[in-house]
Amino acid sequence: MMVQLSDAVDELEQWDRGVALVVHGMGGNFCAGADLSLAREHLRTGADGRSMCALMSDTLTRLRRLPLISVAAIDGAAIGGGAELATSCDFRVAGPESNIRFVQVKMGVSTGWGGGARLVGLVGRRAALRLLAWSPPLAADEAAALGLVDAVAEEEGGALAAAREFLGGVLTQDAHEAVRAVKRVVAAADVPVSDRLHRAEADEFSALWGGAHNRMALEPPSSPRPPRS
């Protein structure tokens, strides 16, 4: 999926028309997080973690810089990397049953795809630290109160329709190239800071990925866990 997402962004970068983009999951969830069996078998070391960070940080940064106004339509779960993916969009619309949760600390790592830096920009330093370190699950109304979610759909499973409605005022603009231009202006404003912070996130994530706590978190629940420090 990570490679497919990168390929999709490659294609979108070639578009010279259009003003908006909706990112939506399939099967009832937005993105429920890492495939633990994949991580156990193929992404075991810090170097593996850095390679994953390089791919996803680049993909999500390029997604954010597209001259298209992007909305994450969040139905169901947006967990871990899925929550980071949601922060890469310009806006977020959530279904009433949605669950957003940054579980990276519970997996023995930190955010690694730029989601920590973006979260600070969305909800502020203190709220971001609480969401990342305490890892509470956020219902749609709680996420909206924090400013992480911009609108809540009325019906369960209705995030995609609500995202399209949210974009209505943009889609009816006649000057499409002007919309694309203002998106480029806004995207350019956070590039210098975000690049530095994303590199810092990748460094922290890579240092923790493959460590004792991370390896234990990837194993089945019956495995013994390391002692708490």
Image: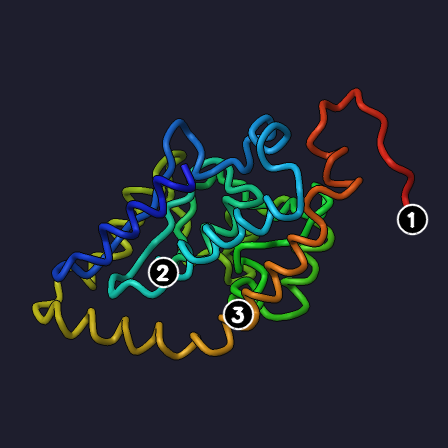
- Place of residue 136 in the rendered image (x, y in percent of width and height, measured from the top left): 67, 47
How far is mark 3 from mark 2, CA to CA?
17 Å
Q: Name the residue carrying label 1.
A: 229
| Residue 121, numbered label | 3
Q: Earlier in the sequence, mark 3 or mark 2?
A: 2
Q: Given the image, on which type of amino acid does mark 3 rest? A: Gly
Locate residue 34 relative to residue 210 in the image: left or right: left
Label 3 sits on a secondary structure element that is helix
Q: Name the residue carrying label 2.
A: 62
Residue at 36% of width from left, 60% of height from top? Answer: 62
Quarter residue 16 falls in? bottom left
Circle 1 Cα neighbour tier, 10 Å, few/some/many (<14 / 14–19 / ≥20):
few
Q: Nearer the viewer, mark 3 or mark 2?
A: 2
Q: Earlier in the sequence, mark 2 or mark 1?
A: 2
Circle 3 Cα neighbour tier, 10 Å, few/some/many (<14 / 14–19 / ≥20):
some
Residue at 50% of width from left, 44% of height from top? Answer: 82
Q: Given the image, on which type of amino acid does mark 1 rest? A: Ser
Circle 2 Cα neighbour tier, 10 Å, few/some/many (<14 / 14–19 / ≥20):
some
Q: Earlier in the sequence, mark 1 or mark 3?
A: 3
Locate residue 184 relative to residue 139 in the image: left or right: left
Q: Is residue 178 above or below residue 100?
A: below
- The N terminus lies in quadrant: top left
Locate residue 76 relative to residue 111 in the image: left or right: left
Verify CB contact (< 8 Å) between mark 2 and mark 1.
no
